[in-house]
Image (spheres, rainbow, N blue to C red):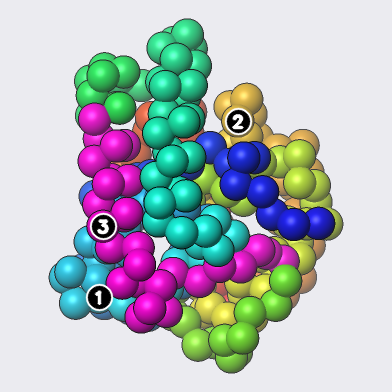
Amino acid sequence: MAFELSSVVPWGRTLEEYKQMFMLSKEDLDKRIISFGDGPASFNAEMNESGKQVISIDPVYEFTGDQLKKRIDETCFQVIKQTRENKANFVWDTIRSVEDLQEIRMKAMRHFLIDFEKGVYEKRYVAHSLPDKLSFVYNEFELGLSSHFLLLYSTLGLDFHMAAISEMMRLCKEVRIFPILTLNAKIPDFFNELLEMLNQNYKTEVQKVPYEFQKGGNEMLVIKK
């Protein structure tokens, strides 16, 4: 089945947010990183401008910058409207208001769009859908990240998550997933079973992080070989 842009609600986060969500140290930022489900985040653009190495993976990268901009413009109001209607589900601390959120997200996505075509040419943005196998080799990356993709979309199911994480672990020495809550702010029903399966081959740990926007969403799952 073809991937359809009309099914996507693009929403981009910044390098500073990634640092907090994944507790990225200065040493981490110097690692070779592959990041899954980045969408229109400015993470890759900002890292590249700082001379750091990141490969971003997302099926939306098969589309042009103009197509992505059109979809961002189409959906921004929808997301902001839903956020305003559910303000009680979020922590308005670092991000002070719905208007502040919109400004931060749109600035990040504009930054991404400016960088996108150059990044595609430099093969920093790779169009790909997990759990399909990527062309990179075993342990090619020191660190893999998943921001607001795995676990958040729990309806993808246990088998999908296990297959997707297995492919990430083939490529990476360590994987970090944030958040570990679903869109309904609950731990996925299959989370304990997933940990049991992962612990057969890897070491897992749930770590608290200094980032919380979705209430209760201040933990990441760390998986190491």
Q: What element carries label 1?
A: loop
Q: In this view, does 2 lie above or below 123?
A: above
Q: Nearer the viewer, mark 2 or mark 3?
A: 3
Q: Is mark 3 on a helix, strand or loop?
A: helix
Q: How crowded is mark 3: few (under 14 residues within 10 Å), some or many (20 or more)?
A: few
Residue 179 at x, y = what percent? 51, 43
Residue 104 visible in the current orientation: yes
Kind of residue at disc 2: Leu
Query: Circle 3 sits on which residue?
Result: 114
Q: Nearer the viewer, mark 3 or mark 1?
A: 3
The quadrant holding residue 42 is bottom left
* Residue lying furthest bottom: 137
Please say whether residue 49 is one of the residues in the magenta stretch: no
Residue 177 at x, y = what percent? 53, 54
Please say whether residue 105 is one of the residues in the magenta stretch: yes
Viewer-nearest residue: 212 or 39: 39
Give the residue displayed 71% in from the left and 41% down from the top.
Answer: 154
Q: Residues within 10 Å of mark 2 (few under 14, many from 20)?
A: some
Kind of residue at disc 1: Lys
- Point out the image quarter for the C terminus: bottom right
Chief secondary structure of the magenta span? helix
Q: Spatial distance from mark 1 to mark 2, Cα to Cα?
A: 31 Å
Query: Circle 2 sits on which residue?
Result: 183
Q: Spatial distance from mark 3 to mark 1, Cα to Cα?
A: 18 Å
Give the residue displayed 24% in from the left and 71% down from the top.
Answer: 48
Of mark 2 and mark 3, the one earlier in the sequence is 3
Viewer-nearest residue: 179 or 45: 45
Q: Is mark 2 on a helix, strand or loop?
A: loop
The label shown at residue 146 is none
Asked if the residues shown at circle 2 and circle 3 are in contact, with their CB atoms under 8 angstroms apart, the answer is no
The label shown at residue 52 is 1
Q: What stretch is highlighted in magenta?
A: 103-131
